[in-house]
Amino acid sequence: MKYLKYIFFNLNKKIKVGYNLRSGRNFNGVICVHHRFGGNKIKRFNIDWFRRIELYGYVYKIIIDYNRTAFIGSIIYENGLYTNIILSDTINLGQRIYSGILNKDIKAGFTCLLSNIKLFTIINNLELYPNKGFKLIRSAGVSSLLTSINNNIATIKLKSGYNIFLLISSLVNLGLVSNMSHKFNNLKKAGKSWSLGNRPKVRGVAMNPCDHPHGGGEGKKSPPRAQRSPWGWLTKGTSSIRKKYKKKKKYKNLK
């Protein structure tokens, strides 16, 4: 056990990676994502998004990563390999999990192909394409449902209500994502939000006319016209690009 602790201590240093925060700016230095800031120095854990090793492993340590909402599990496999994964709910220290495509046991934390899962199974960490790594359903307490399989294509209902269609050869993780109580967290002070890299937001009514369409005027009052963005676009009650795209798609299908 002492030997395993020594290995974990050395690997844990190497498995953390520092990165530069760009404060929402692109390669030209133009702000593309607003209300972002450098914040505190951050080191992010490397995580195994593929999990096709075909081995059983044990949860050696549960890590709280401040850059993620879900908990991270440190896994030591039977061949001595050490990786980090996104933990599913109800998984504890010392628990045995399986990573691979040949699994037939439907247990939380195990990976499995969509073709081997029963309908209406709760899943997380979805691959959009086989061998591309987990891309969806990775934040705390989130899950999705496998609703149907037709001609090698699986229909999955997301928590937002949308349905997506994936190949049945895509890999998924079983169960809910861990740390379901994350939504009840309270930052308690503005400094905590600042250290996470979030800049404060200012109301348009409190600005000058040169800064926002809602700015100016005597004292506090509502905007004199329909509510708009800082660039003058209508923001409430107008159709978005997604809605327009949906209408076009429906029109094409009718043809």
Image: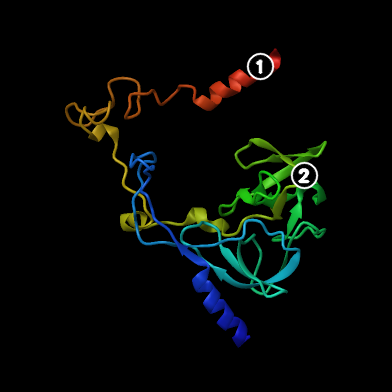
Q: Is residue 130 above or below residue 70?
A: above
Q: Residue at x 42, y 56 (%)?
A: 186
Which corner quadrant holds the N terminus? bottom right
- From the image, tell me which residue sits under label 1: 252
Give the quadrant of residue 106: bottom right
Image position, residue 66 (x, y; %): 46, 61
Q: Residue furthest bottom?
A: 2
Answer whether labels 1 and 2 touch (C-beta < 8 Å): no
The amino acid type, in three-letter code, at marker 1 is Lys
Q: Secondary structure at mark 1?
A: helix
Q: Which mark is residue 138?
A: none
- Label 1 neighbour load within 10 Å: few <14, some 14-19, many 20+: few
Query: Which x, y percent locates residue 40?
Result: 35, 60
Q: Is residue 194 left or right of residue 123?
A: left
Instruction: Tell me the amino acid under the disc marked 2.
Output: Ile
Q: Quadrant of the C terminus?
A: top right
Image position, residue 166 (x, y; %)? 71, 40
Does 219 appear above or below 9? above
Vertical placement of residue 237 versus 28, above or below: above
Residue extending furthest toward the front: 28
